[in-house]
Image (spheres, rainbow, N blue to C red):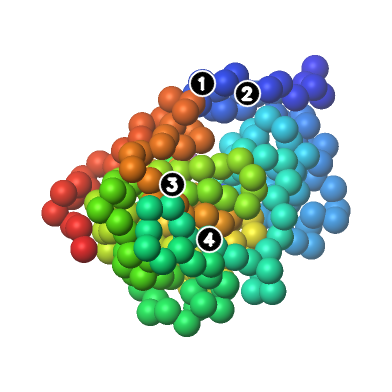
Amino acid sequence: MAGKPKRRAEGAPVGRRAMLGTLGAGAAGLAAAPYLQRGWEGFLASASQMDVTGLTGLLPNPGGFRYYSVVGSVPHKDATDYELRVDGLVDRPKTYTLGDLRAMPQTRIVHDVLCTDGWRVDRTPFAGVRLADILDAAGVRSSGAAVRFTCFDGAYTESLTLAQARRPDVLVALKMQDKPITHAHGGPVRLYVAPMYFYKSAKWLSGISVTDKVVPGYWEERGYAVDGWLDGEDRHGHAA
Ligand SMILES: Nc1nc2c(c(=O)[nH]1)N[C@H]1C(S)=C(S)[C@@H](COP(=O)(O)O)O[C@H]1N2
Ligand SMILES: [Mo]
């Protein structure tokens, strides 16, 4: 059986868990020597790039994280070509380089990471620039009510209300586990929304656009909650 990858049913996020059984044979077939050099994370990234179903996200990773991408291959970007565009309902649109972001005040947050698929990684440090600082620099217009995030994978999107986006525990992250964010984890820059499920933390962040209402993101169009609060988070009292 099994050689043939099944396509994930649209609108059914549970599908990615339900199809675990079909993954085994194909994934084992990919576990060839070249991947060993780069370790398990590199293998997951490589396997995922060949896996149009996205099911490699279900492979266990000893580090606790699992690799997710909704597209097969994502360009690599670094300090020479990375750009973050900030625009929409703002007075001062701006394009940031990685150097620009590194030169801004950095905030480190240690929080538990939880995916809706059931895995978690406790007490994970992330560090980077507060999204609030970037929004303040841009000068959000009074008509602005939400933020839309886009990614250089060309497919994933996310959203936050402006109040959520201004929380001090929401970062444009440059570091994860106290190291530069790897490509597999969405580097060089990903969003990190500490109080919400990890799907809100868009990888390969390339655009921040202020909008007049929430535009549901990729998984939200497919059934996930737009407000991805983790249990026990203070939903109101934490605004910057
Ligand atoms: N661009 C992009 N960002 C994304 C995703 C994705 O598929 N593409 N998956 C989301 C989900 S569901 C999770 S759990 C985390 C996984 O991050 P990781 O691959 O670093 O473990 O990224 C989130 N951000
Ligand atoms: Mo997730």
Examine the rendering and report whether any part of residue 209 can be seen: yes
The residue that mark 2 highlights is 8
Asked if the beta carbon under badge 4 is closer than 8 A to the nearest atom of ligand 1, the reply is: no
Crowd band around label 1 with a 10 angstrom C-alpha radius: few (<14), some (14–19), many (20+): few
Answer with mark 3 or mark 2, whichever residue precedes in sequence.
2
Element at label 4: strand
Labels 1, 4: front one? 4
Residue type marked 2: Arg
Element at label 2: loop
The residue that mark 1 highlights is 12
Residue located 59% across and 65% down the image = 83
Where is residue 43 shown, x and y percent of the image? 73, 51
Q: Residue furthest bottom?
A: 103
Q: CA distance from mark 3 to mark 1?
A: 23 Å
Residue type marked 3: Arg
The residue that mark 4 highlights is 85
The residue that mark 3 highlights is 148
Residue type marked 1: Ala
Q: Mark 1 and mark 3 in contact (Cβ < 8 Å)?
A: no
Answer with mark 3 or mark 4, whichever residue precedes in sequence.
4
Element at label 1: loop
Q: CA distance from mark 3 to mark 2?
A: 25 Å
**Along the line of sight, the residue nearer the viewer: 72 or 146:** 146
Where is residue 142 shown, x and y percent of the image? 25, 53
